[in-house]
Amino acid sequence: MTGTTITLRATKGAPLTNTEVDNNFTSLANNKLEVGNNLSDLTSVSTAQANLQVDPAGTAASQAIAMAIALG
């Protein structure tokens, strides 16, 4: 998946053409994630997990257990 390219009126400084509007919708449609893909369409699952602050594979739980054992 590549980045979505959107043409904005404010950036362009003029109204968008019909083609630019269509290109905006096409870009959004082509660069969206699909719910049914279960993250398989991500470029980097680990980056997505970090951005969403998701604990991959229970890492925090295993660290907490190790700390509890170490501290008695």
Image: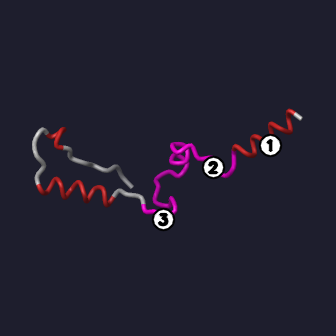
Q: Residue furthest right?
A: 72
Residue 29, given in percent of the width and then of the height, sits at: 31, 60
**Callout 2: SS:** helix
Determine whether, in the image, residue 15 is placed left or right of residue 58. left
As measured in the structure, the alpha-carbon distance from the residue carrying label 2 to the one carrying label 1 is 16 Å
Residue 32, given in percent of the width and then of the height, sits at: 37, 57
Determine whether, in the image, residue 68 is placed left or right of residue 29. right
Residue 35, given in percent of the width and then of the height, sits at: 46, 63
Q: Which residues are magenta?
A: 34-59
Q: Nearer the viewer, residue 15 or 45?
A: 15
**Callout 1: SS:** helix
Residue 7, given in percent of the width and then of the height, sits at: 21, 46
- Residue type, label 2: Pro
Which mark is on residue 65? Answer: 1
Q: If you read the primary sequence from the N terminus, does the residue marked by circle 2 or circle 1 appear first?
A: 2
Q: Quadrant of the N terminus?
A: bottom left
Which mark is on residue 37? Answer: 3
**Callout 3: SS:** helix
Image quarter of residue 11:
top left
Q: If you read the primary sequence from the N terminus, does the residue marked by circle 3 or circle 1 appear first?
A: 3
For image coordinates 63% across by 49% down, the residue present is 56
Position of residue 2 relative to residue 63, above or below, is below
Q: Is residue 13 magenta?
A: no
Q: If you read the primary sequence from the N terminus, does the residue marked by circle 3 or circle 2 appear first?
A: 3
Instruction: Give the number of callouts.
Output: 3
The 10 Å Cα crowd at callout 1, few under 14, some 14 to 19, many 20 or more, is few
- Residue type, label 3: Asn
In the rendered image, which residue does mark 2 sit on? 56
Position of residue 36 relative to residue 68, above or below, is below
As measured in the structure, the alpha-carbon distance from the residue carrying label 3 to the one carrying label 1 is 33 Å
Q: Is residue 37 magenta?
A: yes
- Residue type, label 1: Ile
